[in-house]
Image (cartoon, helix red, strand yellow):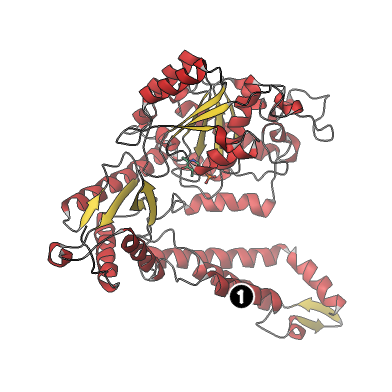
Amino acid sequence: MDGKCLDEWIRMSYDSDFSLRCGEKLSQLFSMHLGSLQSDQRDFQTWVGPEDNVRHAESFLQAPGKLQASANEVLRVEGRSVADSASLVEQFEKAVGVCLQKSQGLHHPRCAGHQVPASLPLAGWFDALTSITNQVQGVYEMGPWSVAVERAVLNQVGVELGFEAGNFGALVTSGGSLANLTALLAARHAQFPEVWEKGTESRGIQPVVVVHEDAHYCIERAIGVMGLGTNQLVRVAVDDQRRMCVQALNHVLNDLQQRRIPVLAVVSVAGSTACGAFDSLPEVARVCDRYGVWLHVDAAHGGALGFSESHRSKLDGLELADSVVVDAHKMLFVPAVCAMLFFKEPENQFAAFDQNAPYLFDPSEPTLARYDNAVVTLECTKRASAIGLWGVWSIFGKAFFGALIDRVITRASELFQRLEQADDFEVWGRPECNIVLFSYRGNSLDREGRTWDEAFQLRLRRRLLEMGRGYLTQTKVAGRLYLRATIMNPMMTEYDLDHLLDEIRQAASEIQQPVKGAF
Ligand SMILES: *Cc1c(COP(=O)(O)O)cnc(C)c1O
């Protein structure tokens, strides 16, 4: 390849005017994309299998600059090479267009799949700042403003959750899974500080972690990662609304105490992944307190309810927890990933990673070290991920988040009502937040002699997804499979709910129904 050409591309890549033109193009294309999703002119997604997609993505790498012959990209002007920026912008446009076209349309009105929000475009633009200025945080001096933004957000969110202002520990890390692991590491360090150096078996006895029956899989994974052994996970039974049964918890802890088995932590949930159940935290906290056990609340999904006047009571007692995880990239509607971890005791913030890295931390400035993220998070180079939340909050205020949350929860309860009234659906239970579980049962006319079993529900879900007409997930509760709608788009309307149900009916009628057996 022509060395001059590469030199010219390097110059162009860093050129502020070229950057401006790419940025304008991106914002234009995204706006069109958003508009077409919201107005339902576009399917929520065009389904393509993974192999075909990988091949397609690879084709861009194998034939870069396919749009034009590379010779055309460098024009000779008075003996100098000048990269043809117009054609580069054109290529950028083409690549961005493919990315948008191939992306999952989270802003589509019938997308009710995972706990991933139709993120606020404004939050996305703030988040883009992190990428284009490459602010990272290991120590304060690497990204003073982004560290400050993150601290400010944590200070305020902690208070919304009920912690005492200025008197709790907190950090931001890459996702709820990592935040949960960090919390359990801190819980271990608080009780068994020697383990960090001597390993898990230094006491000759392994602690157990007592968890909500429907705890997110990342809890079990954390226990595995920590070397405790996943056999050390003890599940506590739940009641008929899938809330941790407090009597069962008491029984378990009592039994462990009798047997002198140490408990590393109790993991309770505020907004379970499967169905959005909220444990009764004051009662759970009282039992943990009785046995002197660390209470960790996984509020990755439901912690955001602290912003809602109407729904914050579901988090009553959260302030009694030793540690709490809240994902901002779920019901605070910012792009992934931004997970917050809070500690009731400020010093526990420093407990998880009991380590010194002399090249990072400047001993002449010990107070600054309190702002060094690398001390408190697993990450060294850490993305500055709180800016979306900070930016939106700075413009609209905190009540705005409460309003967004109220909307999705209201929509979920409207969906519940519709499902309850419809004779061709069966709904699992009244939603506590924005997650609704149900099955399709067929209408009374064609119910005779047909079965709407779990295999049918799965085929129905796939059909909907592959046709791009709507998105649901599936889950199992008490061993039974359900379709699961998670309302994560505050712009979804009641009309969209009706439309979604109609699409499900349509998809059901299209797939061949098994005729044997009755339900
Ligand atoms: C989503 C979720 C997690 C995992 O968080 P990530 O940010 O996806 O890593 C953990 N616990 C609960 C209850 C969740 O809903």
Compared to residue 324, the image places residue 225 above or below, namely below
Q: Nearer the viewer, residue 493 or 288?
A: 288
Q: Which residue is mark 1?
A: 55
Location of the N terminus by quadrant is bottom right
Q: Position of residue 80 (x, y in %)?
A: 85, 79
Q: Left or right: 30 with respect to 3?
A: left
Compared to residue 471, the image places residue 102 above or below, namely below
Q: Nearer the viewer, residue 51 or 41?
A: 51
Q: Position of residue 170 (x, y in %)?
A: 59, 29
Compared to residue 450, the image places residue 493 above or below, namely above
Location of the C terminus by quadrant is bottom left
Q: Position of residue 113 (x, y in %)?
A: 40, 55
How packed mark 1 is, by other alpha carbons closer than 10 Å (few <14, some 14-19, many 20 or more), is few
Q: Nearer the viewer, residue 377 or 50?
A: 50
Q: Is residue 222 at least partly visible in the picture?
A: yes
In the rendered structure, which amino acid carries the disc numbered 1? Arg
Q: Left or right: 136 with respect to 98?
A: right
Residue displayed at 22% across by 56% down: 425
Residue displayed at 24% across by 63% down: 451
